[in-house]
Amino acid sequence: MKRALQGVLVLGWIPTLAFAGGVKWLVKAPSAAERTPVTVTRMFTGPDGKTHAEDITVPLGELQNSSERSARIDVNGLQFVRTSPAYDLDWHTAPRRQYVVTVSGESEVIIGDGTHIRLYPGKIMLAEDTTGQGHISKSIGGKDRVSLFIPLADK
């Protein structure tokens, strides 16, 4: 009886120790295939002269020191942009090929087929529709939007 009671007490401490010490040892570490992919929404001018959009996944290298990196992309500067809730641009093209990364606030882009693309914190867009019909850009959410415009270097 004494041995059974000791066994119950010891086994009872296992969940307590797991809770107090964390349960990392019970959880399998995610592999690179299970990690969140880096996606970019690419806007481009199609043969019909209208802007189209597609989501592309950025290829990343091997995991090294807890980080995976893409190939280097040559850029030509960086611009901080703040737009007000009144931001509402009718049809226009991108002034140059550039990444647009939303830091705070929200806006949306409307393309030729009527698709609405929401831009929110962390969303990355590659604007390449420098010719053709272009797109509409407008603020949503009633707050300022802060974004980074990162022009690509000339090819």
Image (cartoon, rainbow, N blue to C red):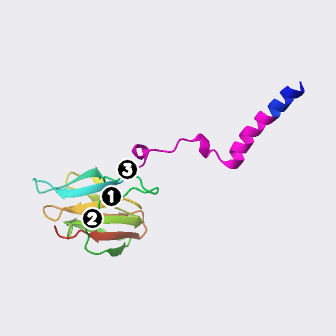
Give the CA separation, mark 2 to mark 1: 8 Å
Q: Is residue 87 visible?
A: no
Where is residue 145? Give x, y as percent. Answer: 39, 69
Q: Which residues are magenta?
A: 10-36
Q: Are marks 3 and 1 in contact (CB under 8 Å)?
A: no
Q: Which residue is mark 1?
A: 70
Q: Say what amino acid the circle numbered 3 marks.
A: Pro
Which of the 4 image quadrants contains residue 108?
bottom left
In magenta segment, residue 22 = yes
Mark 2 / mark 3, whichever is N-terminal: 3
Where is residue 34? Give x, y as percent. Answer: 43, 43
Tell me the tag on residue 73: 2
**SS of the residue at dot 2?**
loop
Where is residue 10? Give x, y as percent. Answer: 79, 35
Q: Are marks 2 and 3 in contact (CB under 8 Å)?
A: no
Is residue 15 left or right of 128 when viewed as pictured?
right
**SS of the residue at dot 1?**
loop
